[in-house]
Amino acid sequence: MEYKVDKTALVLEGGGFRGIFSAGVLDYFLKANLHFPYAIGVSAGAAYGISYASQQFERNRVVNERYTADSRYMSWMNFIRTGNLFNPDFIYDEIPNNLVPFDYKAAFDSFCDFNIVVTNVQTGEPEYYSSKELNEQELLSAIQASGSLPLVSKMVPFKGAYYLDGGIADSIPVNKALQSGCERAVVVLTRNQDYRKEPAKFQWVIQKKYGKYPHFVNKILRRADAYNQTLDLISDLEKEGKVYVIRPQEQLEVSRIENNPKKLDKLYVQGYTEMSQNIDALLKWLFPGGN
């Protein structure tokens, strides 16, 4: 049976490699034939989520198993040599175009309008790009920009400006989703229930490195407050029935830059399994009168 949801957004938080939890959740959605008309992803949420839009079951899992421990994917030597901890040529070219092919046509033709959040370094503001409005190279550039972490990534040129991690300006874009014609949202988080973000570390390093971009620095320094306020908003919307929250139930055992494939696959399985155990509750929320 196929489930096409009406006027309900799918919102995907980032979190680096913790996003593999969301990949497990999304693969269960594909198995259940559950399709959202609008989705928006930040950082890893965009990187993992785009394979949901293209309906490529287990593509993220295959990439993790084969390549996340590969030095071509991530290494401190690469950071020393190039200024990028994560190798963009390998991640956003070699993998999707050759090693584990991404189905661009399926993504562009998808029922799901997939949106990507990036942070403009000059303005410090979030910008949002629909996959329906991008070509193949622009799609990869937007996803790269969304997931390029400050301090360990170079700024990404895109559409005449420079961008970094979308989570700096809009970590959990539930407001954007609800302002885009959707009445409700399913929000997939990558932290446990009791998590609250702490203020940024190494603030003096951030201020020194990005001193030419005061709006961007201000966003980083205020990010923890903004993030925690969004969690409070999501809690309120959940009580109102406008948001359904999916988050890891078991305690997380991976960090943002964890690249041990076995640990990451365990988190993928956790996402897949927990969603399988809760799919009936989600479907009841999505289709209160039955589908």
Image: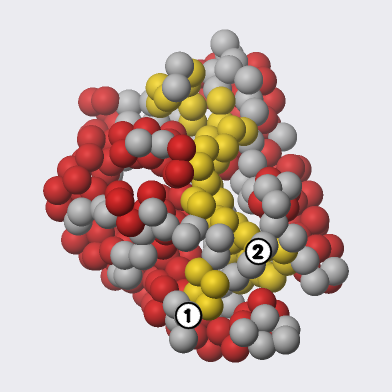
The residue drawn where x is 53% and y is 88% is 277
Front of the two marks 1 and 2: 1
Mark 1 secondary-structure assignment:
loop
Image quadrant where residue 223 sits: top right
Residue 270 makes an appearance in the image: no
> Measured along the vertical axis of the image, is residue 126 above or below residue 60?
above
Name the residue carrying label 1: 2
Q: How many residues crowd mark 2 within 10 Å: few (<14), some (14–19), many (20+)?
A: many
The residue drawn where x is 41% and y is 62% is 52
Left or right? Give the position of 69 relative to 280: left
Q: Which mark is residue 213?
A: none
Left or right? Give the position of 11 relative to 54: right
Left or right? Give the position of 93 relative to 35: left
The picture places residue 114, in percent across and down from the top left corner, at: 49, 51
> Measured along the vertical axis of the image, is residue 50 above or below residue 85?
below
The residue drawn where x is 80% and y is 56% is 233
Return the disc, 1 or 2, that comes first in the chain's sequence.
1
Mark 2 secondary-structure assignment:
strand
Name the residue carrying label 2: 8
Q: CA distance from mark 1 to mark 2?
A: 16 Å
The residue drawn where x is 56% and y is 60% is 37
The amino acid type, in three-letter code, at marker 1 is Glu
Nearest to the observer: residue 172 or residue 134: 134
Nearest to the observer: residue 169 or residue 178: 178
**Which quadrant: the C terminus?**
bottom right
Q: Residue furthest left?
A: 98
